[in-house]
């Protein structure tokens, strides 16, 4: 049974994972490969990292699942995730990093809605205010950006379809609670790598990295975004409610927007900074709550 203190820790773990994935659009922008090739190398380079980690933790190279249905559901989740990432990567050549990231990360809305419609999971108490505050802050970062663009309809449509795919992926893996997070992330990574091969052959373009910079860029993407960020999200997503998890995932567009401001000279203006403050305040409040809860728990245990 996961208590409120543990749920807060899982939430922060998920939020940190989302922050790491916020680096992904930067790596995508820097890459000269096709959208599906970027996905393929991200997954392929992450696989040996997961295998090594499994050996260090479990003293084995094999990933033995607890339930035979795990393979099917991870394959299903991977198909949705593959669709999400390929469309998202493609959209960034049409629209800005900020636009692509904010639209794709409307996925939490679909997660909460699907969880309610399919599993009858009611939003957590205070979800409406927390979600609205956080999401308005992120939308504000985009709308008031100096390079905000409109009229790039096709790129926005690709991002919206990608958001639905990402929501399906998150919802499916969140229901694999009896399976280990390491098994889930390994098999989703494996299937995404497998599913990306055919699109990579079909879409043409560059498939093989040809420079040290490209290899470094792809490895960092695999390490930070897949092995790091996606793994942390996999650990946390099944331990918190869909509504709370959806708020934690909003750290991704927040991180991407800030990075784009520094790296691509998308300078934040005063209004953006105010919106940014809203979001930082919310997550800081959660961190203080977690620390305070830990202190109370330790005090109570020491005085039993």
Image (tube, grey):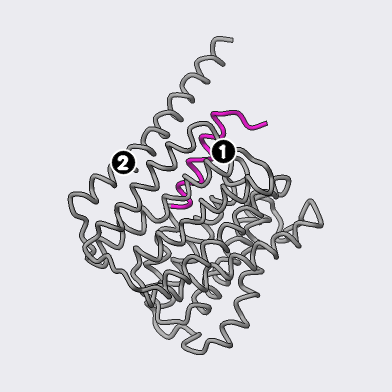
- Residue 30 coordinates in the image, percent (x, y): 36, 74
- Residue 263 coordinates in the image, percent (x, y): 27, 65
Tell me the SS state at disc 2: helix
Q: Earlier in the sequence, mark 1 or mark 2?
A: 1
Figure quadrant of residue 98: bottom left
Residue 6 included in the magenta stretch of the image: yes
For residue 123, above or below residue 53: above
- Residue 218 coordinates in the image, percent (x, y): 45, 72
- Residue 137 coordinates in the image, percent (x, y): 33, 47
User: Does residue 117 appear in the picture of this structure?
Assistant: yes
- Spot the residue most to the right: 68
Q: Residue at x 63, y 62 (%)?
A: 51
Q: CA distance from mark 1 to mark 2?
A: 22 Å
Residue underneath mark 2: 278
For residue 202, above or below residue 16: below
Locate residue 174 relative to residue 256 in the image: left or right.
right
Locate residue 221 relative to residue 172 in the image: left or right.
left
Query: Where does the magenta region start and end?
Result: 1-18
Figure quadrant of residue 20: bottom left
Residue 289 included in the magenta stretch of the image: no
Q: Residue at x 58, y 63 (%)?
A: 165
Q: Residues within 10 Å of mark 2 (few under 14, many from 20)?
A: some
The N terminus sits in image quarter:
top right
Tell me the SS state at disc 1: loop
Locate residue 128 relative to residue 79 in the image: left or right.
left
For residue 295, above or below residue 215: above
Residue underneath mark 1: 123
How many numbered marks does the figure carry?
Answer: 2
Callouts 1 and 2 close, C-beta under 8 Å: no
Q: Residue at x 76, y 62 (%)?
A: 72
Closer-to-camera residue (135/73)? 135
């Amino acid at each position: 049974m996961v208590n409120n203190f543990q749920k807060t820790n899982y939430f922060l773990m998920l939020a940190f994972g989302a922050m790491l994935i916020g680096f992904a659009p930067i790596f995508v922008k820097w890459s000269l490969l096709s959208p599906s090739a970027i996905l393929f190398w991200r997954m392929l380079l992450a696989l040996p990292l997961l295998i090594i980690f499994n050996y260090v933790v479990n003293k084995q190279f094999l990933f033995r699942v607890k339930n035979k249905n795990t393979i099917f559901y991870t394959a299903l989740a991977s198909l949705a995730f593959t669709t999400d990432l390929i469309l998202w990567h493609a959209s960034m050549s049409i629209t800005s990093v900020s636009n692509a990231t904010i639209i794709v990360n409307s996925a939490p809305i679909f997660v909460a809605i699907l969880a309610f419609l399919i599993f009858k999971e009611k939003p957590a108490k205070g979800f409406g205010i927390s979600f609205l505050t956080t999401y308005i802050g992120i939308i504000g970062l985009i709308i008031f950006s100096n390079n905000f663009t409109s009229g790039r309809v096709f790129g926005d449509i690709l991002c919206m379809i990608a958001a639905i795919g990402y929501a399906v992926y998150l919802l499916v893996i969140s229901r694999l609670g009896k399976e280990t997070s390491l098994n889930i992330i390994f098999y989703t990574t494996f299937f995404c790598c497998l599913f990306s091969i055919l699109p990579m052959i079909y879409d043409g373009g560059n498939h093989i990295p040809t420079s040290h910079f490209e290899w470094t860029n792809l490895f960092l993407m695999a390490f930070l975004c897949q092995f790091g960020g996606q793994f942390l999200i996999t650990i946390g997503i099944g331990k918190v409610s869909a509504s709370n998890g959806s708020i934690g995932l909003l750290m991704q567009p927040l991180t991407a927007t800030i990075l784009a401001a520094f790296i691509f000279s998308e300078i934040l203006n005063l209004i953006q900074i105010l919106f940014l403050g809203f979001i930082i305040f919310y997550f800081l409040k959660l961190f203080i709550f977690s620390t305070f809860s830990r202190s109370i728990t330790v005090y109570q245990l020491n005085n039993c």
